[in-house]
Image (cartoon, helix red, strand yellow):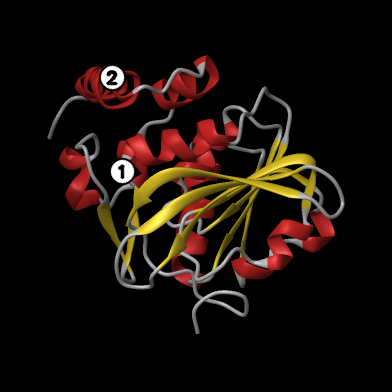
Amino acid sequence: MIEEEDYSARRASMVDYQIIGRGISSPLVIEAMRRVPREKFVPRGMIDCAYEDGPLPIGAGQTISQPYIVALMTEGLDLEGGERVLDIGTGSGYAAAVLACIASRVFSIERIPELAEHAAATLAAEGYSNVEVRCGDGTLGWPEEAPFDGICVAAGAPTVPEALKSQLAIGGKLVIPVGSEHSVQSLRRIIRISETEFHSDNFGDVRFVPLLGEEGWS
């Protein structure tokens, strides 16, 4: 077993080479990636792989995203600190932890009960008291806590769910993969300009598990 200090060294190296080295420049995102112990969010048997440059299986057919993708999506939200953020697809809870280092409140939805329960326990054990996790259909968002300054979706959707767009605050940003269920998707950022006007950016190709739900894949 690798000693605890070696994980810190691996985390620092990951940030230098995988995050900063690929162009992530937000000081808040870089600091969050330095702080969150990814080894706590992967299955016990895969701890030694925690800082590898890729996704890892976490059970139930789901994955913990590649560190760079977590950083890219977080940077895409343009957080300055103190925001309310909706996280769709909790998975292991790692991305929620990264968001929690910047935002004041993170509301995270996971459709698979055992993953939601495990992520909530891990986040609580690691001291992320500003994250609330619930099990449900992420495509419908969390309307009673809307509007959100940022929404981050860690699964590929056929189209951008209207429910999520409606829960964005004016000026808020939604980062979501959109495209085919079984191949690459385009990572899009949707910015709410007004009640009825939205602007879209494309961050390039990504590959995520499908977003299942009422406004996602069936």
The alpha-carbon separation of the residues under discs 1 and 2 comes to: 15 Å
Residue placed under numbered mark 1 in the picture: 66
Within 10 Å of disc 1 (Cα), the crowding (few <14, some 14-19, many 20+) is some
Quarter location, residue 30: top left
Residue 72 point in image, percent of width and height? 44, 35
The reply, left or right, for residue 120 in relation to residue 199 is left
- Residue 153 location (% of width, % of height): 53, 54
Q: Quadrant of residue 135?
A: bottom right
Identify which residue, 137 or 173, lies in the foreground.
173
Q: Nearer the viewer, residue 183 or 152?
A: 183
Q: Is residue 15 visible to the viewer in this orientation of the structure? A: yes
Q: Residue at x 79, y 42 (%)?
A: 193
Q: Residue furthest bottom?
A: 218
Residue at label 2?
A: 21
| Mark 1 vs mark 2: in front | 2
Element at label 2: helix
